[in-house]
Amino acid sequence: MTSTLRPPRLRRLLLPAAASAVLLLTGCGLVGPAEYDTETRTIEAEAGEEFSITVPYSPGQGEWWYRVDPRPDDAVVRIGGEHQDLDGSDLDGGTDGTKSFDFEAVGPGTTKIRILHCPVGTCVGSGASVSPSPVASPRQTTTDPQPRYYTYTVTVR
């Protein structure tokens, strides 16, 4: 009698190889959204593409970043969520990391996105309406931390 089953040894060799091939193929095409930083302020995207603006972030040091008005044109870019990736914990003061602002390219056109960086104690308000604090003293020096706007130009094809 002839058996059509493969010998157990051959199955033991083929099973790990097949499992590895499945895992490799499963990962194909899994590239996350494009990320841009404070140095790259010109963004080109295809309609439907997701992207993030990722900035260095130290909330434990009183540093904050905000997406501010004017909002980008909704017909060109849709505003998504925000997320942060922090090292350490609040307990040990190790709250350095990054903050990301997420967007989706919606339709053809060009628009602007504004992000405000607020070093400790330099901004008032909250959310999109936050603004730099008025200068309290005429003796402010150039080494004092200053709020700074970052404007990104987004072109969607």
Image (tube, rainbow, N blue to C red):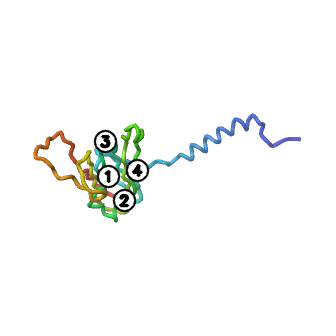
> 84 or 54, which lies in front?
84
Residue 145, position in %: x, y? 21, 43
Residue that label 1 marks: 43
User: Tag 3 or tag 2, which sits nearer the N-term?
Assistant: 3
- Mark 2: secondary structure: strand
Mark 2 closeness class: few <14, some 14–19, many ≥20 residues within 10 Å: some
Q: Foreground: 89 or 114?
A: 89
From this viewpoint, is residue 23 visible?
yes
Residue 118, image x, y percentages: 26, 48
Q: Residue furthest front?
A: 91
Kind of residue sitting beneath label 2: Ile
Residue in view at x 36 percent, y 55 percent: 45
Q: CA distance from mark 2 to mark 3?
A: 27 Å
Q: Position of residue 17 (x, y in %)?
A: 64, 38
The first of marks 4 and 3 along the sequence is: 3
Ranked by sequence position, the earlier of labels 2 and 1 is 1
Left or right of residue 83, residue 144 in this image: left
State which quarter of the image contains the N terminus.
top right
Q: Is residue 12 above or below residue 52?
A: above
Residue 79 is tagged as 2
- Marks 2,1: beta carbons within 8 A: no
Identity of the amino acid at label 4? His
How far is mark 2 from mark 4, CA to CA? 13 Å
What residue is disc 3 on?
A: 61
Mark 2 or 1, which is nearer the eye? Answer: 2
Q: Earlier in the sequence, mark 1 or mark 3?
A: 1
Camera-near label (4 vs 3) is 3
In the figure, 71 relative to 96: above or below? below
Tell me which corner region of the image, top left, top right, bottom left or bottom right, holds residue 88. top left
At 11% from the left edge and 43% from the top edge, which residue is drawn?
139
Query: Label 1's element?
Result: strand
